[in-house]
Image (cartoon, grey):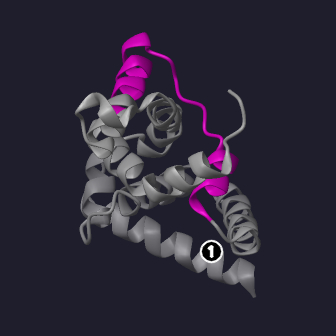
Amino acid sequence: MTPLTPAEQQLVETHYDLLCRVARKRSPDWWRDARQIGFIGLVKGIRSFCPDGGMPLEKWLARHIDFEIRRAIDRGKAPLATPELAFDVAAPHGEDIVELRDEIVAMRAKIDTLPEPIRKAVLAHLAEADQGRAGGEQARAARKLGWPLWRMRDTIERAQRLLAADAV
């Protein structure tokens, strides 16, 4: 894919929230990867849009984003996470996002040191918290893992204690 022109970059930044909405709607379980796949559709939509075509830009872009995500799902390709793409597109302020990315990498390294069942619970909890629905993350994560809620709560509390002890 050729690099974006400044005008295309501006349109990507303007319609990034549309990309996230379509990705969450189409693929709530792996929306971050769907967002990256949908980015290709967003760029294709921007580059192929014709104002005289009779379709509003947002609808045109949503169709292209959705098409790329559905195509990836239909092909059965396992999405590969490449967070650099999402960070570069989402953040107009590069220094802030680099600091945030460094913090995320450091936290992920700490989580990776946890014992397997605790790490699995923490990652499931974070995935549910990242879905954008307020409250009930532990209950949804417990259901996803097939655990009773009390086990999830206990495991998350233990993870918090372990991570807090590691930070000191």
| Residue with the mark numbered 1 | 162
Quadrant housing residue 133: bottom left
Q: Nearer the viewer, residue 71 or 112?
A: 71
Q: Give the extent of the magenta segment.
A: 66-91
In the image, farthest residue toward the front: 52
The location of residue 135, given as percent across then percent down, is 25, 72
For the point 35% across and 23% down, which residue is it?
70
Q: Taking the image as drawn, is residue 58 in sight?
A: yes
Q: Is there any visible trace of residue 27 in the rendered image?
A: no
Q: Quadrant of residue 29?
A: top left
Residue at image point 52% right, 23% down: 78
Quarter holding residue 28: top left
User: Who's the residue at 72% across and 61% down the image?
Assistant: 105
Dominant secondary structure, magenta: helix
- Depth check: give the residue in front, 84 or 166: 84
At a point 62% along the width and 74% down the height, the residue shown is: 162
Kindly give the residue lying farthest to the top in the view shown: 75
11 with respect to 71 (left or right) = right
Say whether residue 87 is magenta: yes
Is 97 drawn above or below residue 108 in the view shown? below
Q: Position of residue 96 (x, y in %)?
A: 70, 75
